[in-house]
Image: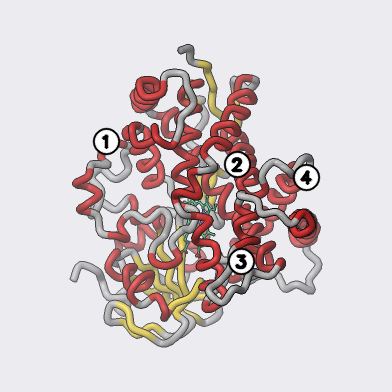
Amino acid sequence: MFFKQAGGSGPGFTSVVRMRRDPLGYPIEVTRQYGNFVKFPVGYGGQPIYLVQDPELLERVFVSDRDKYMKDVMIRRLTGVFGNGILVSDGDTWKKSRRLMAPAFHRRAIESYADSMVRATERSVERLREQPLCAINREMMRLALDIALESLFGSELGNRAEVIGEALDEVLVYVDHQLHSLVPVPRWLPHRARSRYDRANARIRSIVEEIIAERHAADEQRSDLLGMLLAARDEDGSAMDDRQVADEVVTLLLAGHETTALWMTWTLYELGQHPAVQSIARQEVRSVLGDRAPTVADLPELSYMTNVLEESLRLRPPAAITGREAAVDTELGGERIGAGAQIITSMYAMHRDPRFFDHPHVFDPTRWTPELRKSLPRFAFFPFGGGNRRCIGEAFARLEARILLAVLLQNFEFVATADAPPVPHVSITMRPRDDLFMRVREVNG
Ligand code: HEM
């Protein structure tokens, strides 16, 4: 067995604090020192924490023993934001949401958004033309939000889109705060981040509820994501109530736009660091598309560019860490795991593990051969999670990222600035702590 048992020697009493301080580096250090199944001596609220960096054990947590686990305590802190939405719910509520939402996320359904993704990227190209030095993280957030809003609501939002965009920024500040405080701030305690969040959340909810009411009044079925959620029926004919639909809409807005924006941001950053890779990717886009806009049928031809995106997900997974809580007493890797124990795993650490990837810290899209894919254990590369709670938006994100990158490379060269490397900040996602500036140069036909 190539993992160290959780019961053996392990990290010291400060491990939770160190994990919080350095959520990317610390799991790598712990795994190197103590093995890939490690118990922290002090956990949250008296419950132990296990760091699991072993693909076989993760397969048990996420797949074969998944009924024994639920979402972890950190993600449950976000129920104030996501309500009963699919990201944070468990049990029958989650099952029903997933059943009702799945058809809207099938590959075929998703592909109908390709044209609107192209149009949104063209709008971004216009904005980028005006910004030779661009905070690329901000522009990618704007672009991804534009796409998320249009996919959810069609084009009927008007100036409500801006209100939602600003309010979502406030919500993300609050999410960050909730995940970084050692204990959540109780609701009765006056708190600045929360009162701003409360107002922002109320603004988003009231717009979403307003749109749902407009849809009911119009009594026609629309083909955007909201239309599909409203029309979805369970086997017994039941639908989601409006409150549940609103929770799911907020979930999709938050889970869907920042992750993809970060995927694009980190990819452009890596391309700025590796101009030769960028140039090969651009040549491929040119030879497949010339100057025309990409369609779904073109995407399989863009294999080098797709591997660039894959390599970016490996080194800079937008969701860098995830976890579960044992719902019942159970066993894992020979260790007795009590109900309430927290399991943490770092995709970031796993994706940089030399057991699975040669020269793991090197950005090299050519490593993504069919042989590598075949040889990798299921949970050695899992940027979208795995098992029944695998990301429902994966096909959407993959479509979006390929369209965006193709159109951006057709138009621009992305050049690194001389600034120091960006410092990653881990919240529910991994984002650059500060604005990430790049030079954006137009390329001609
Ligand atoms: C690069 C882009 C994305 C990444 C890296 C990503 C990552 C993930 C991961 C790792 C999970 C599973 C978390 C866990 O099991 O603990 C997840 C779940 C989820 N994602 Fe994504 N995601 C991305 C894009 C999207 C998009 C575009 C959408 C929606 C349009 C979306 C919606 C969701 C939802 C609703 C869940 C919860 C699914 C469930 O619990 O049944 N994600 N995502």
Cα–Cα span, label 4 and label 2: 15 Å
Disc 3: residue Cβ within 8 A of ligand 1's nearest atom: yes
Closer mark to the observer between disc 3 and disc 1: 3
Which of these two is toward me, 378 or 76?
A: 378
> Do the numbered discs 2 and 3 sit on residues whose CB atoms are within 8 Å?
no
Relative height, residue 194 to residue 325 (above, below): above
Please tell me which of labels 3 and 1 falls first in the chain: 3
Q: Which residue is drawn at 54% across and 46% down?
A: 431
Cα–Cα span, label 2 and label 3: 20 Å
Q: Which residue is drawn at 43% across and 55% down?
A: 384
Numbered badge on residue 85: 3
Residue 55, position in %: x, y? 29, 64
Residue carrying label 1: 366
Q: Which residue is drawn at 46% across and 18% down?
A: 291
Please tell me which of labels 4 and 3 falls first in the chain: 3
Cα–Cα span, label 2 and label 1: 30 Å
Cα–Cα span, label 3 and label 1: 38 Å
Its colouring scheme is secondary structure
